[in-house]
Image (cartoon, rainbow, N blue to C red):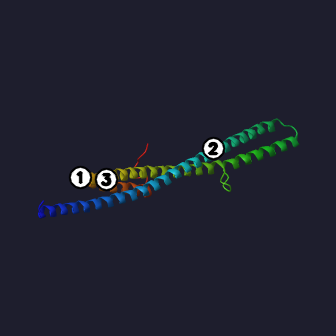
C-alpha cells in the first residue's frame, strides 16, 4: 500500500468516524426525547384513568341522589293523596308538615350548592371530570405517536452506522421533528388533531 493510498484510507476512516459521532449524537438526542415523551405519556395515561374513575364515581353518586329524590317526591305525592282523605285537623297538619319536609328534601337533592352534592352540581362535576379525562386521553395518544417516531428514528439512525446509508439518518432526523411536533401538540393542543375514535 502506497503512502498516498494509506493517507486516503486514514482520511476516509476519519470522515466515517466523524459521521458516526454525529449519528451517535442524533441517537442520544432521540433517546432523550423518547424518555420525555414516554414520561409525559405515562402521566397523561394515569390522569386519564384517574379522571375516568372520578367521573364514574360522580355519576354513581348522581344516580343515587336521583333515586332518593324520586322516592321522596313519590312519598310527597302519596302524602298529598292522604292529605285529601284526612278529616282530622291534627292529622292534616301532620301530613302537610311531612309533605313540606319531603318537598324540601327533594329540592335539596336536586340542588345543594353549599355542599356541591345536589344532582345539578354532581352532573356538572362529572362532566368536568369527563372533559379532563378526554383531554388527558388526547394528550396520551399524541405522546404515544411521538414515542413511536423517536423509537423508529433510533432504529434508523443505528442502521445508518452499520450500513453507512446516510438517507436513513435524514429520515431519522425527520422523525425527530415529527416526534417533537406530536409532543408539542400533546402538551399544548391535544385536540387540534383528532387521533382516536
Q: Which mark is residue 60?
A: 2
Specify which label sits upstream in the sequence, 1 or 2: 2
Tell me the crowding category of disc 2: few under 14, some 14 to 19, or many 20 or more residues within 10 angstroms, Cα based.
Answer: some
Q: Which mark is residue 35?
A: none
Rendering coords of residue 86 (x, y %): 84, 37
Residue at 70% in and 49% down: 108
Q: Is residue 90 left or right of residue 104?
A: right
Determine which residue is flagged by label 3: 158
Tell me the crowding category of disc 3: few under 14, some 14 to 19, or many 20 or more residues within 10 angstroms, Cα based.
Answer: many
Check disc 1 and report its element: helix, strand or loop: loop
Rendering coords of residue 169 (x, y %): 27, 55
Where's the N terminus, which quadrant? Answer: bottom left
Q: Are marks 1 and 2 in contact (CB under 8 Å)?
A: no
Q: Which mark is residue 165?
A: 1
Q: Is residue 70 above or below residue 143?
A: above
Label 2 to label 3: alpha-carbon separation = 52 Å
The foreground one among 166 and 161 is 161
The foreground one among 144 and 55 is 144
Specify which label sits upstream in the sequence, 3 or 1: 3
Specify which label sits upstream in the sequence, 2 or 3: 2
The foreground one among 175 and 94 is 175
Amino acid at each position: 500500500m502506497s503512502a498516498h493510498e494509506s493517507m486516503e484510507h486514514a482520511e476516509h476512516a476519519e470522515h466515517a468516524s466523524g459521521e458516526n459521532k454525529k449519528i451517535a449524537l442524533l441517537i442520544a438526542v432521540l433517546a432523550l426525547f423518547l424518555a420525555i415523551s414516554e414520561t409525559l405519556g405515562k402521566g397523561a395515561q394515569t390522569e386519564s384513568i384517574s379522571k375516568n374513575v372520578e367521573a364514574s364515581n360522580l355519576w354513581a353518586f348522581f344516580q343515587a341522589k336521583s333515586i332518593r329524590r324520586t322516592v321522596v317526591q313519590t312519598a310527597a305525592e302519596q302524602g298529598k293523596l292522604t292529605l285529601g282523605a284526612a278529616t282530622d285537623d291534627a292529622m292534616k297538619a301532620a301530613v302537610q308538615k311531612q309533605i313540606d319536609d319531603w318537598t324540601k328534601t327533594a329540592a335539596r337533592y336536586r340542588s345543594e350548592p353549599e355542599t356541591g352534592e345536589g344532582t345539578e352540581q354532581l352532573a356538572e362535576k362529572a362532566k368536568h371530570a369527563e372533559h379532563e379525562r378526554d383531554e388527558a386521553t388526547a394528550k396520551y395518544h399524541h405522546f404515544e405517536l411521538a414515542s413511536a417516531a423517536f423509537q423508529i428514528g433510533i432504529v434508523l439512525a443505528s442502521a445508518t452506522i452499520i450500513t453507512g446509508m446516510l438517507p436513513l439518518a435524514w429520515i431519522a432526523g425527520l422523525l425527530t421533528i415529527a416526534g417533537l411536533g406530536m409532543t408539542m401538540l400533546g402538551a399544548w393542543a391535544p385536540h387540534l388533531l383528532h387521533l382516536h375514535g
